[in-house]
Image (cartoon, coloured by chain):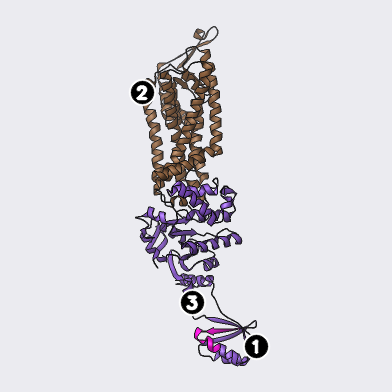
Chain colours: A brown, B purple
Amino acid sequence: MAGTMTVASKEIRDQFGSRRFLILFGLIVVLGGLSAYQGVDYIRNNVGSSFVYIFSGARMSFSFIQIMVFFGPILGLALGFDAVNKERANGTLSIVLGQPIYRDSVINGKFLAGAAALTTLALTTIAIMCGITIPMLGFAPTLEEALKILSLALLTMIYLLLWLCLGILYSVVFKKTSTSILASIATWMTFSIVISIVASALAGALVPLPGGDIIFTPGGQSGEGGQRFSVSPEYMEAMQERMALQTAIQNISPTQLYQGTASAILGTSSFGFGRQEFARVTTLGEALANNWANITALTVVMVAAFAASYMMFLRTEIRPGD
Amino acid sequence: MENIVETQKLTKAYGDFIAVNELDMEVKKGEVFGFLGPNGAGKTTTILMLMGLSVPTKGTAIVAGHDVVEESREVRRVASILPEYSSLYGELTAWENLDYIGRLNDQPKEERENRVAEMLDIVGMSKWADNKLESFSRGMKQRIGIASTLMKDPQVVFLDEPTIGLDPVATREVRDLIMRLNKEKDLTVVMTSHLLHEIQMTCSKIGIINRGKLILLESMENLNKTMSGGEDRRVEFMLTETTPDLVKDLESVNGVKSVAQENGRLYVYGGADSDLEVSRTITRHGAYILMMKPREYTLEEIFMKYYNQEVAG
């Protein structure tokens, strides 16, 4: 344990002193502040709105959740992608492992340091957002809202740690940092962007919509001169099936799981970066009950990624040049 | 003298490739052991196994009384390694780097601080204690690297190519440092190098390894004796005058195989027991000996001889 804490304390110092972390930290805090300000604006204009809407920004703007969806993978991967292979490249791995410590101290220490940095970032951002908004609004969150914020913080930490663990895994699997950074970028793009396109295309191909079922008639609900359309039950059913399939495919992505769960906790619905709507307000208990599978999936992926990197690191042969 | 490193049939295979093949060697306490061999011969792999960082496929190795597999952590308490081309952490200062190594060795704060100061002093880097390593020259980094190996007060240090990439001044500094540590602290040093003259100047014993097999294990003293006393023994003379009669008489001296003249020098080939009679013959011919020098074989010649034998056979 002494070795783990020694490695962790050095790594924490490195993380907090690294430019890449400080830049991302600064960016997220600034964006979080702006999001909170917009949330305040929304709450002021909609009397009776929940305090947690400060994390949702305003309609047609970005929110804390969307900041995390976009930057979370970058943050986690950035802190983990070169954790082990950088030590190999510099030849410090055999020096550190040449000391009388257990081998897992190194990987545990690196994980703890990354976890500490990401937790600090998430909690600081949330604290700053609350700190800005409470004086502006003149009221504090209720107990239920405070618990929602706490749940959001915990979920965000799991989500960020998942990406950190994936980054560490890449740093163990790939000997070169250039390869692990490419793998990290590819993973981030796949789960953040490509998955939606693939899911849409796949769902479209697998569930075709019946043709000629939308009937347009002049006038009607759209008003004078407008058009009225009706949809057949078969079309509606196929559309719902397609949407369900698309969502199921998208849920392979941790970003989608996080976004869905975080939105449910806050009682909002998000539709990607820059678009969102507020859904019906649910209680925290309801949100957690409806999304426990998502939370479990995120946790399992995180643990699996760390377990894989842990096992691989322990089995890795130290060879000349390490 | 007790053995501090001892291996028996130590073998390491990576799939079908055998990096180290049934290596039997021993290093005694207080020796500076030079490990020689071409690239890929198995030197570094051997050192990694001796440090408990790589698990042998077969055979055993004992370092300072501890089995490298069963008591790997104990081995790492009493042995240190400085890998080839390695450097410590560039973003940390010299002091912080050594302090980190001390903490990994679980040294209490006060002891650690005293030790860091002492080590920096030993390697002559006290002035730069608060400078980041990334601002150091390669030679300075190497001195800090050596200091880091001493933080745990080891019984044996493994230095993998410690002078590689250094300029002549830094090379000499590192070499002197290794020899000083060996003398003053009775530290056992096992070092690899491609620079054969470096090994010759620094080591008291050498092992030559090729394709994973140890082809020679001998003290430098015995090696020089063997080589200068062998079939190829040659003594070089510089005389005030050389006459055809003298050459003829020298050739008839018991034990002398042949005599040759080149660039004003006289080369007498033969055993050491003929040296006295050769000197007498020269004096009898009225010549004075200005210089008499038995040929000293360089380690390169020794290495090449054994290497060629191994390759041929």
Q: Chain of mark 2?
A: A
Between marks 2 and 1 in the image, the one whose residue lies nearer the viewer:
1
Q: Nearer the viewer, residue A188 or B98?
A: B98
Range of magenta residues:
B264-278
Figure check: A43 above or below A252? above
Placement of the N terminus of chain A among the 4 image quadrants = top left
Figure check: A48 above or below B150? above
Q: Which residue is mark 2?
A: A289
- Disc 1 + disc 3, Cβ < 8 Å: no
Q: Quadrant of residue B252?
A: bottom right
Q: Chain of mark 3?
A: B
Residue A178 spot, x, y in % from top left: 53, 44
| Crowd tier of the residue under label 1, counting other residues whose Cα lies within 10 Å: few below 14, some 14–19, many 20 or above | some
Residue B27 magenta? no
The answer to whether residue A242 is visible is no
- Look at 55% across and 47% down and name the residue there: B93
Figure check: B304 above or below A104? below
Label 1 sits on what residue type? Glu
Q: Secondary structure at mark 1?
A: loop
- Disc 2 + disc 3, Cβ < 8 Å: no
| Marks 1 and 3, the one that precedes in the sequence | 3
Residue B140 spot, x, y in % from top left: 57, 54
Q: Which mark is residue B225?
A: 3
The single residue placed furthest to the top in the displayed view is: A224
